[in-house]
Image (cartoon, rainbow, N blue to C red):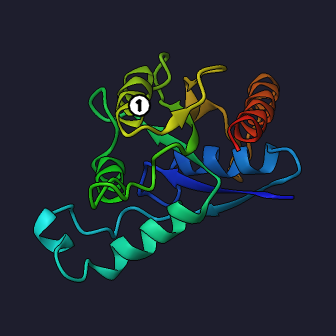
């Protein structure tokens, strides 16, 4: 039986290295995982007043998408040692209304990337901190910090580094096991 995974990409840019990385991860995943990408850029900023009555349709749709998935894969760049605003907003939107969080108990995995050498370490840990508070279940090991990301893809957007491909394949296998373990 397939497990459904929602993919949240922190970068809003269509041609971003982060989006290429997210697509690569879905291609390297073992059989039994099905992916859908949820867009975060058009979500209205979280405002508790908007949750009274009928919340914005974009929020409702996002909550349904994440809520019905078996797991969430976060793939994000690092902005100022944290996650991009659209991703943080998505966490807030999904965590409300109180008592109805879509993150509660949800298996998840985090992959961060950056053009620099530390691979988005700050974003990875900042996101992990929020997920733990939200009672999501982020995979502890292996951790994935993809440094020098700008050098890893060819002109067609395909991952060209064999060592990184092997690591990401192992990461996705571990994520599949993590999802099964928590299901």
Dividing the image into 4 quarters, which one contains the N terminus?
A: bottom right
Q: Choose top left, top right, bottom left or bottom right for residue 175.
A: top right
Give coordinates of residue 84: x percent, y percent: 32, 44
Give the answer, above or below, for where 151 lies relative to 75: above
Dividing the image into 4 quarters, which one contains the C terminus?
A: top right
Relative to 80, is 104 on the left or the right?
right
Give coordinates of residue 105: x percent, y percent: 52, 43
Residue at 46% from the left image edge and 46% from the top image edge: 104
Residue at 80% from the left image edge and 28% from the top image edge: 170
Relative to 61, is 165 on the left or the right?
right
**Residue 17 visible in the current orientation:** no
The outermost residue toward the left is 49
**Residue 40 visible in the current orientation:** yes
Give the answer, above or below, for where 13 lies relative to 147: below
Q: Which of 129 and 85 is in front in this view?
A: 129
Residue at 43% from the left image edge and 48% from the top image edge: 10
- In this figure, which residue is indicated by the disc labeled 1? 132
Give the answer, above or below, for where 3 lies relative to 44: above
Relative to 6, is 12 on the left or the right?
left
């Amino acid at each position: 039986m397939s497990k459904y995974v929602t993919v949240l990409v922190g970068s809003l840019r269509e041609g971003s290295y982060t989006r290429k990385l997210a697509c690569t991860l879905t291609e390297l995943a073992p059989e039994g995982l099905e992916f859908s990408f949820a867009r975060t850029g058009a979500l209205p900023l979280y405002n508790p007043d908007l949750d009274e009555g009928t919340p914005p349709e974009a929020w409702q749709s996002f909550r349904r998408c994440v809520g019905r998935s078996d797991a969430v894969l976060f793939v994000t760049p690092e902005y100022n040692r944290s996650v991009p605003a659209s991703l943080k907003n998505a966490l807030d939107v999904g965590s409300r209304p109180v008592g109805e969080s879509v993150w509660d108990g949800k298996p998840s995995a985090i992959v961060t990337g950056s053009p620099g050498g530390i691979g988005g370490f700050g974003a990875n840990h900042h996101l992990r901190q929020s997920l733990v508070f939200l009672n999501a279940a982020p995979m502890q090991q292996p951790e994935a910090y993809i440094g020098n990301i700008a050098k890893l893809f060819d002109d067609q957007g395909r991952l060209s580094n064999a060592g990184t491909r092997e690591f990401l394949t192992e990461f996705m296998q571990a994520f599949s096991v993590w999802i099964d373990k928590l299901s």
